[in-house]
């Protein structure tokens, strides 16, 4: 599934990022992750840094399938939906890392991913907790679901930093309405409130990782400045 030819295939050990910097931006739907990933990339390009913005679901073949599920053009059975999504996302992530992220890090790029495994830990665990018990097979408490998703992502390259945009769910909902577009799978007010709670506890979801929270409720420029203050030392500017 490679999207980048390489004559010298490399073996990458989980948890070891090569030369570049791998940054992840996370938050609930409408928190501004896409906006802020692009703004920070522009900030880096203006300083002549090599930068690449990517996202999950990825632009690869597995990501395309997930996108069809999210936009509800492809429907899953009602049983074990969250588990199926967790598996799809974990597979897409390993492909994304191997085909796109690692080669660019090896070339010295700052790679900014709009979502990564924190999204799986927040969305699929929270969604499973909301599913009807008869739609779940096995004793999938939030704790077992969390451990299982961590295990699925055991070989996912660790970011240098995961930045969480904490946004009031009502503000995020207003932004989504302002943006327009069709309703998506996780577009439910109650779920988004729970997700905001999960993101506030992001450190517990990603033990051992470097996680920094930035308040994303305010004006775009003010948030961009707060993000640059966190990320510039990480990327070395
Ligand atoms: N700080 C802000 N103030 C006002 N509007 C904003 C702010 N940040 C982003 N927006 C607008 O809100 C909408 C949602 O932003 P964006 O698409 O970046 O969110 P997102 O977190 O990527 O959402 P999703 O998770 O659904 O992809 C966009 O129309 C964007 O222009
Ligand atoms: Mg987005």
Image (tube, rainbow, N blue to C red):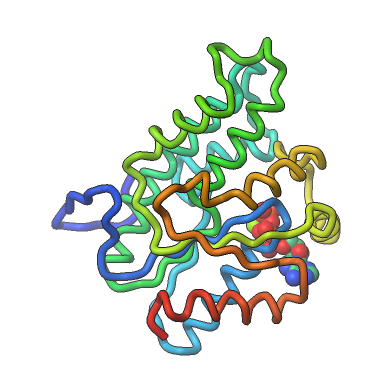
Q: In screen coordinates, is 184 left or right of 93? A: right
The residue located at (85%, 61%) in the rendering is 178
Q: Residue furthest bottom?
A: 47
The residue located at (40%, 77%) in the rendering is 235
Looking at the image, residue 96 lies above or below residue 120: below
Q: Position of residue 88 (x, y in %)?
A: 48, 33
Q: Quadrant of residue 93?
A: top left
Q: In screen coordinates, is 130 left or right of 154? A: right
The residue located at (42%, 86%) in the rendering is 237
Q: Position of residue 138 (x, y in %)?
A: 53, 12
Q: Position of residue 137 (x, y in %)?
A: 56, 12
Q: Position of residue 51 (x, y in %)?
A: 43, 74
Q: Quadrant of residue 48?
A: bottom left
Total marks drawn?
0
Quarter of the rendered structure image containing ligand 2: bottom right
Q: Quadrant of the N terminus?
A: top left
Q: Closest to the observer: 13 or 180?
A: 13
Q: In screen coordinates, is 21 left or right of 31? A: left
The residue located at (49%, 66%) in the rendering is 53
Q: Closest to the observer: 69 or 236?
A: 236
Q: In screen coordinates, is 232 left or right of 69? A: left
Q: Closest to the observer: 77 or 153?
A: 153
């Amino acid at each position: 599934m490679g999207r980048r030819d390489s004559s010298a295939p490399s073996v990458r050990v989980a948890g070891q990022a090569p030369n570049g910097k791998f940054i992840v931006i996370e938050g609930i739907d409408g928190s501004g992750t896409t906006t802020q990933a692009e703004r920070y990339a522009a900030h880096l390009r203006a300083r002549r840094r090599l930068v690449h913005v990517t996202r999950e679901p990825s632009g690869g073949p597995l990501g395309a399938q997930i996108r069809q599920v999210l936009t509800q053009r492809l429907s899953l059975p009602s049983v074990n939906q969250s588990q199926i999504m967790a598996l799809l996302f974990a597979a897409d992530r390993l492909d994304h890392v191997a085909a796109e992220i690692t080669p660019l890090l090896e070339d010295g790029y700052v790679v900014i991913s709009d979502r990564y495994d924190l999204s799986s830990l927040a969305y699929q665990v929270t969604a499973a907790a909301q599913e009807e018990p008869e739609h779940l097979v096995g004793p999938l408490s939030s704790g077992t679901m969390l451990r299982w998703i961590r295990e699925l992502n055991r070989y996912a390259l660790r970011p240098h930093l995961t930045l969480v945009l904490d946004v009031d769910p009502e503000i995020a909902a207003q932004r989504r309405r302002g943006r327009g577009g069709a309703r998506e799978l996780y577009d439910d007010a109650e779920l988004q409130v729970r997700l905001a709670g999960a993101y506030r506890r992001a450190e517990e979801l990603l033990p051992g990782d470097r996680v920094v929270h930035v308040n994303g409720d305010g004006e775009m420029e003010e948030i961009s400045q707060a993000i640059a203050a966190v990320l510039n030392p990480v990327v070395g500017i």
